[in-house]
Image (tube, rainbow, N blue to C red):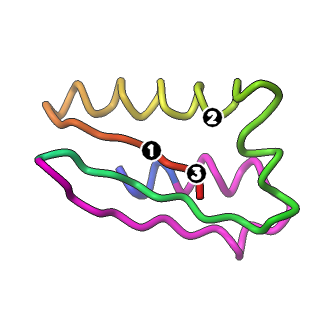
């Protein structure tokens, strides 16, 4: 799952080397924290959060196939 999120984030930004994804497990939920360069934050979030919602939808679909609970946070 981490590879999927990293691939999507690196595809969106101008500085792919600054992208990092960390996984933290809390109460049975895997929380993936996506860190990007400050100037790329808008590209990952998108207007009115549309890109962020799309990333979460793709990851949620992949998580359902694996019977996991996953959350994606853009930090």
Residue sticking out furthest to the front: 27
Q: Earlier in the sequence, mark 2 or mark 3?
A: 2
Neighbor class of circle 1 (other Cα within 10 Å; few <14, some 14-19, many 20+) is: many
Which region shows up in magenta? Answer: 6-27
Q: Is residue 55 left or right of residue 25?
A: right
Q: Residue at x 23, y 25 (%)?
A: 64
The verdict on residue 1 being magenta is no
Whole-Å distance between the Cαs marked 1 and 3? 7 Å
Which residue is disc 1 drawn over?
Answer: 72
- Do labels 1 and 3 touch, CB within 8 Å? yes
Identify the residue at image location x=41%, y=34%. Answer: 59
Report the disc number at residue 52.
Answer: 2
Give the number of the disc on residue 74. 3
Check contact, mark 1 vs mark 2: CB within 8 A. yes
Evaluate if marks 2 and 3 touch, with contact meaning CB atoms under 8 Å apart: yes
Q: Does 41 sit left or right of 39 as displayed?
A: left
């Amino acid at each position: 799952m981490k590879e999927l999120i990293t691939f999507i984030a690196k595809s969106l930004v101008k500085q792919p080397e600054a992208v990092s994804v960390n996984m933290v497990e809390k109460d049975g939920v895997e929380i993936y924290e996506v860190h990007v360069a400050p100037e790329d934050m808008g590209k990952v979030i998108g207007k009115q959060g549309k890109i962020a919602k799309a990333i979460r939808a793709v990851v949620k679909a992949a998580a359902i196939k694996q019977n996991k609970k996953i959350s994606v946070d853009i930090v």
